[in-house]
Amino acid sequence: MRHRLLTALLAGVLLPAGLAGCGIPHETQVQVDGAGPAGQSGALSGSSDQPPAPTASNDPKEFIRNYLSAAAGERDQAVNRVKQFIAPEGQSRLRDRQSSEIELFVVRLPEEPEATPPNNEGTSEVRVKVQQLGVLRADGSLAPPVASDTEYKFKLRRVGDSGWRITDPPKVLLLSDEALYDYYAPHTIYFWNSDQSRLVPDQRYLPQALPAERKVTEVIRWLAAGPPDWLSPGVIRLPDNTSLINNATGSDGRWEVNLNMPGAKDAQLAHLATQLAWSLPEQVTGQLDLKIQNQSRLVVDIGQEKSGRPPYPLDGNPERFCVYDGAIHPLSFPGEPRGTVPVDAASNRSIVTAALTRSGGRILAALVVTRSGRQQLLVGAGPSPVTVFKGGREFTSVSRPTWLRSTDPQHPYGLTAVDGVLYRFDEVGNLTRVPLGVDGKVTAVAASVEGHRVALVVNGALYVAAVSTDGGAPSLGQPRRLFTKLTNITAVDWYAESRLVFAGSEPRGGTRDPRPAIYGSSVDGALEKPLEQDIGAQVTRLSAYPGPSGALPAYSYMYEANNGAYTPSGIIKPEQVLNLASPTPGNKAPNPTAPFFLY
C-alpha cells in the first residue's frame, strides 16, 4: 500500500515516469493526462487503512519506516500508537498530551535508511537521513518546519517474541511523507478575499479513516480557526468568536451545521454558505441547513450553491502560444483550440518571452523585448489585438512576467523579476519595487489561478506568498519557503489550484551529480513527485495552465530548455507553429521558444 500510485498528490492523474537519456529528448511517449484538478480527494465514509503494527516487519529498516507512519490518523491515539514501537525504557521520552496539542514533524527520506546487521545480542542501529518538511498541526495544516535535524539514529533491540523496539526514540512525533500519502487525503478549504469577490484555496490534510460526519466537523472547525499565517494577508477570517456548537450531523442528503456567530447577518450567512459548499468534502451533497445557536437561518442546496457561485472567475478556453523567431505565434495541438495572436504585428517583434491574459473583455499583454542586447518590459491592454504598448528603461534581464488575476479588471497589475529584484507593473508599464521579506536574488515569479497567491524563486529556492490588495495596489505577505529535493530551482508555475510545477537540479547518483529535472508539488511542498528526470539541459522558462482541464490534458505545462520548447510528450516542432509568413524548410528552421498559455 505504501508504494501505491499517489492519488493523494494528483487526484487521479498518472504521473509521468522519469525520462531517461542524457540529452533533451526529441520525442517521448510520456503524457500527463487524466481527470482535471480536484479540490479534495479521499473516501468520505472513512477507510479501514491503519498504520502497520510493530510486528508487521522483522527487517530493521522496514520497522523504522513503519514507525514513521505510526502517528498517522486520528490524533487522540497517536502517542499510544507510537509507543507500541518503543521499548519500555524509552517510553517516558514521549509525554501524553491533548490531541489538539499534538504536532507531527513531517520528514522526507531522500535516501534509503541504513541499518547495521543484527548482532548476537539482538540489537541493531538504523540511521535515517531526513529533510524537514513542516509540522502537521491538529487543524490539518502543514506549518513551516521548526526542527533542523538532518539525521536520526535509532537503536533497536528485540523484545521477546514481539520483534524490534526502539530504545532511544526522539522526543517528537515523526511522520514520513510516505505516510502522509498513505493515510491522509489532501483537502482544500477556502477563505474569502478581502472584498469577498472570490475564494482563495488553502491546503489541508484529512485522515482517511475519519467517518463522514467527523470530516465535515473538522472542516468547519478549520474554517472557524482561520487561515495559516502565510496566507492571512490575502484573505479574511470568519467573524470573531465564530465556533461550532456540537458536531455536524447528516443523513438522507441533509446536513445540519450549528454555529455560534454573534450578530450574524443574512449577507454573512450567504457568503458562509458558499464558503462551506466549496470547502466540504466533494462527496457531501444535498441540503445544508445553517443554524445559528440552534435556530435555522439558511438552507441551501450544496450542488446548486457550487454551480451558481464558482470560487473565482476562469472564462474562455486556454490556448497555447510560443515565441518563434522573435514573434508570438499560436501553436497547433490535436483537439485543442487554436488562437490568434492578440498583439498587433507592429509590436510583435524582438520578443524574448510574454504573458497574456483575458480580463474584463480585454487582453492584458506583457512583453519582454530585446533592445541592443538589453531587455525591456512593454505593457499594453485593450481589445484584441492590443496596439498600444508602453515601457520604461532597459535592464540586463527581465523574467517572464505574470499577471495577477485582479478583482478590479480596470486596474490590473502584474509581477516580474528585474535584474534579481521583484517589481510590480501596471497596465501602462509603470514599475514599482515590491518589498520582500526574504533576502536574495529573485529569478522567477508566478501567480495562482485566483490571483491571491504567488510562487517565487529566490536564490534558487522555492517560496510561496499571499497577495494583499487591501491598499489598492497589491503587496506580498511574508514568503514561506518550501523544501524540495531539487536544488538551484530555475522556473516555477501553478499547474493546478494548489499545486506547483517547478524545475531545478536533482541529485542523482550523489549530490555531486545533479541533473536537470521537473517536479510537481502541493502548495506546502509536502506532496512532491518527479514529473520529468534527466532532461539533459537546464529549464530556463516554464508555463502551466492551472484551471479545469477543458480541451487540454490535465496538469498541462510547457517549458524551454536548450533553446527549444517542450511538453511532457516531447519537443514542440516548427511545424506546430501557426501563421508563419514563409516557413523555413528543414534544419534551417529556428526552434520555438518561451511557450505559454493564454486564458
Image (tube, rainbow, N blue to C red):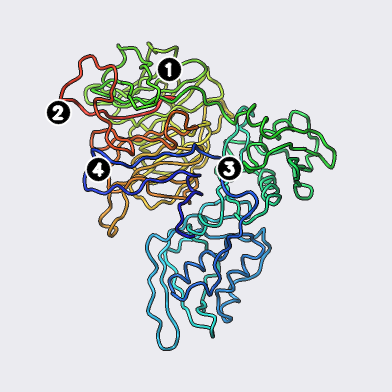
Q: Are marks 2 and 4 in contact (CB under 8 Å)?
A: no
Nearer mark to the viewer, of 3 and 1: 3
Query: Which residue corresponds to mark 1?
Result: 428
> Which of pointers 2 and 4 lies earlier in the amino acid sequence?
4
> Which of pointers 3 and 1 lies earlier in the amino acid sequence?
3
Nearer mark to the viewer, of 2 and 4: 2
Query: Which residue corresponds to mark 2?
Result: 587
Nearer mark to the viewer, of 1 and 4: 4
Above or below residue 118? Residue 584 is: above
Q: Secondary structure at mark 1?
A: loop
> Which of pointers 4 and 3 lies earlier in the amino acid sequence?
3
Q: Amino acid at mark 3?
A: Thr
State how far apart marks 1 and 4 are (Cα).
36 Å
Query: Which residue corresponds to mark 3?
Result: 188
Q: Secondary structure at mark 2?
A: helix
Find residue 45 and report its horizontal and vertical position in percent.
65, 51
- Which numbered disc covers residue 117? none
State how far apart marks 2 and 4 are (Cα).
21 Å
Q: Amino acid at mark 1?
A: Val
Describe residue 564's horizontal placement relative to residue 201 as left or right: left
Q: Secondary structure at mark 3?
A: strand
Mark 4, other Cα within 10 Å: few <14 / some 14–19 / many ≥20: some
Find residue 376 and report its horizontal and vertical position in percent.
31, 23
State how far apart marks 4 and 3 are (Cα).
35 Å
Q: Amino acid at mark 4?
A: Ala
State how far apart marks 1 and 2 are (Cα).
40 Å
Q: Are marks 1 and 4 in contact (CB under 8 Å)?
A: no
Quick one: 500 or 511, which is closer to the camera? 500
